[in-house]
Amino acid sequence: MADYAAVNRRHLIGRRRTLVTPEGVDLQLSLADGGQRVGAFLLDLVIMFAALIALSLSALAIVGAFGAEGANVGAIIWLLGFFLLRNFYFTLMEIGPRAATWGKRAVGIRVIARSGERLTADRVIARNLMREIEFYLPLSFLLYNLSAGISGGFTALAGLVWTLIFLLFPLFNKDRLRIGDLLAGTWVVKAPKRKLSVDTLTGESRAEHYRFTEAQLDVYGIYELQTLEQVLRDDQADSIASVAATIRHKIGAADEGWDRDFLVAYYDAARARMERGLLFGKRREDKFDRGS
Amino acid sequence: MTPTLPADSRRFRAEREAEWRRLEHIVATAEGRSVKALSDEDLLALPVLYRGALSSLSVARETSLDLELVSYLEELCARAYFFVYGVRTGAGQRLRAFFARDWPDAVRGLWKETLAAFLLTLVGILAGYGLVTADPSWYDSLMPGDMAQGRDFRASAEQLRSTLYDGGSESGLDLFAAFLFTHNSQVSILCFALGFAFGVPTAMLLVYNGNTLGAFMALFSHHGLGLEMGGWLIIHGTTEFFAIILSGAAGIRIGWSVIFPGEESRIDAAARAGRGAAIVMGGVVIMLLCAGLLEGFGRQLITSDLARYAIGLTMLAGWSAYFYRPRRIPNG
């Protein structure tokens, strides 16, 4: 993975993936978590199940309203509706511009092509037709066994192994690919959505009050600086107090109170110094990084 | 020296923030409703603003330590990217492209696999026919009970003849068609999906499918009803078997590319085969819809052997011409 980002993302690298746009910039998208994938799928199942109940009720209503003549029409509507729902709910939803089913939208994930090209219909069809062997086949197999009352140890075991292979497949590759994703050249990422927060971290304009020496500013690296930024943005009194105490101790500054102002001033000064360093190609990842 | 303000990175942000906000607004509008909701002015501005934001991102990554800013730009660029390089053709346009080009091209690309799937089915038919002719007791093991519907060696020639022309209960034709369509589609989707296991289950399904057909033929020709049975079968069978052979071919293509990926990596080869095969599968469902209609309505309403053969062979010629007739390669 390209290691050029000035921002320290060491803690994120595990789930970040390179996506180079045609302009040659790496967007570094985050893969969806296993939990999100499972949650989205369960939500979709609930939605499909609800749609199936609605379909059955309307088919029954038709039969009820038209009697024997309606029975045929009702049965046809049900059969075709069930077929469409089973095979094309996922496909039709993911072909749209948001590339996500309702379940995926709810948890905030979407499908993209692994290569960074546009997501085309053939990819969406391929990834969703594979659900046939990943999910529906074991399911119908299981239901059939239950209804037929076959408690054969071997068939049950075979069915279980089959199901587990496909179910757990995403856990055994680093990109969290289903078989369908593998075959379609897609993956599922977090759909980006974020508001830009206020940039300037302001204290009570006592910034002039503080003076730091170069040695004091060089104690920390990028990782610590960004952790400090996070603490200031979260703005929790107790964590600010403990962080301020730690930093004062580390750089040997006197405790004069005004914890937040002190931290903002230190953050500004340290960031200015590190950013200047960046311009000259000097990077310090964290406090242990002594350069080479 | 104690610098008090990281002036450069703040100025960098102040100079460009208005553009980022505008891009964000455009993208949010497009996400909320659709790209059509954008004014012409916004639509023209989108690609320019997007590339501006990308360049800001590159600069920010190299020079700014503001985690918030870099994350914001990354996500803004990603959102804009999905629109600039997203799917923009309408559904109608896409359907037209599918029928005019994508589907027949994909089918033609599978011609080797289609031939293999056809041969596998043929082997199945011959084996089924040969086995049942030699020893009728094979029939029951080759034919699933619910598919035979009383058509077995215990039935008389008269009974068998009636199954060919009576068409069962007249009232349920449309339902029968819908049932056949969904059932056959499910089988062919399975045929495709199982291709992933190196194509072996797909090949087995194809041979088995041929077996039942062969056994069926043997039963009827045993009673001297071969020609009549041919008409009963061919009216929809050319379409249905073509579709099943195509789905088998799609499965074989996937299995083959997993075993022999060529110069690509195994995953890339599988992904490429999977995409082409998926297009074929989209079309197979349509073919099976035709087959279901022919089987449910056409076969039950048309009882003349000649008409049945004519329709069946016309369908075959039509599909073949549609898929395999030479096409001009479009420029660009």
Image (cartoon, rainbow, N blue to C red):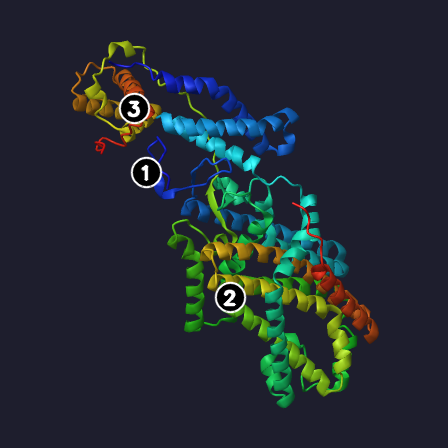
Q: What residue type is labelled 3?
A: Gly
Q: Mark 3 points at which residue?
A: A277
x and y percent of residue B161 in the render? 77, 81
Q: Which residue is drawn at 65% across and 62% down?
A: B182
Q: Name the residue under label 2.
A: A141
x and y percent of residue A60 in the render? 68, 55
x and y percent of residue A208 in the render? 28, 9
Q: Which amino acid does label 1 sit on?
A: His
Counting residues from the start of the chain, the first of labels 2 and 3 encountered is 2
Counting residues from the start of the chain, the first of labels 1 and 2 encountered is 1
Residue count near mark 3 (Cα–Cα under 10 Å), binned few <14, some 14–19, many ≥20:
some
Using the image as rendered, state which of residue B332 and residue B161 is in the foreground. Answer: B332
* Side (left or right) of B222 relative to A118: right
x and y percent of residue B206 in the render? 59, 71
| Residue at mark 1 to residue at mark 2: CA–CA distance | 42 Å
Hey, which residue is sitting farthest bottom in the picture? B134
Residue B190 visible within the image: no
Q: Which residue is drawn at 25% across and 18% down?
A: A259
Residue count near mark 2 (Cα–Cα under 10 Å), binned few <14, some 14–19, many ≥20:
some
* In this rendering, the label closer to the viewer, 1 or 2: 1
Q: Which labelled disc corresponds to residue B254?
A: none
Given the image, what chain letter belongs to the residue carrying mark 1? A
Residue count near mark 1 (Cα–Cα under 10 Å), binned few <14, some 14–19, many ≥20:
few
